[in-house]
Image (cartoon, rainbow, N blue to C red):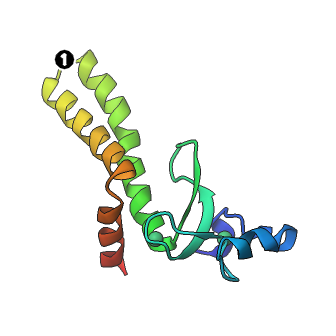
Amino acid sequence: MKRKDRGCYCSLWQQSPETLIEQGVKKGYCGVCNICDQQGHLRHAPGAFPYTDAWCDQCFKVQSVINLLQALAIPMLVGSLFFQAWLFTGLAALLFGQGYWLNNDGKAIIRKLSRKLV
Ligand SMILES: [Zn+2]
Ligand SMILES: [Zn+2]
């Protein structure tokens, strides 16, 4: 990922470097990954999710996939209810559930997945 595509808060180094140093962030980064505690970047969550957190590049990739699946689950759920396709309803609920669960309790799993990508 190119630096300018990241949309992170590295510009904080110009504005208030003390804040970053206080958080234990090293030069070239702007946050500590919330999943694996490595140096990473503070940025908006992937997909249309309204939150900001810090991820390293590897964890961010995994998080993108999870968020994408979760975002896909919503129209799938609505569609399957409309067509009364209960199999898809279950699948969508499962998809949405796994994303929710991973985001809250499954950080160890994301960490493992992201290490596999390296
Ligand atoms: Zn950054
Ligand atoms: Zn990480």
Q: Residue at x 57, y 56 (%)?
A: 53
Using a 10 Å C-alpha cutoff, classify the residue at mark 1 as few (fewer than 14 neighbours), some (14 to 19) or many (20 or more): few
Q: Residue at x 36, y 60 (%)?
A: 107
Q: Quadrant of the C terminus?
A: bottom left
- Residue 114: give x, y in percent of width and height: 36, 71
111 sits left or right of 60 in the view: left
- Residue 88: give x, y in percent of width and height: 19, 31
Q: Residue at x 21, y 28 (%)?
A: 89
Mark 1 lies on a secondary structure that is loop
Q: Residue at x 31, y 56 (%)?
A: 106
Name the residue furthest left: 87
Q: Quadrant of the N terminus?
A: bottom right
Q: Determine whether 80 is above or below 66 in the image.
A: above
Q: Which quadrant contains ligand 1?
A: bottom right
Q: Amino acid at mark 1?
A: Gln
Name the residue furthest right: 15
Q: Nearer the viewer, residue 25 or 100?
A: 25
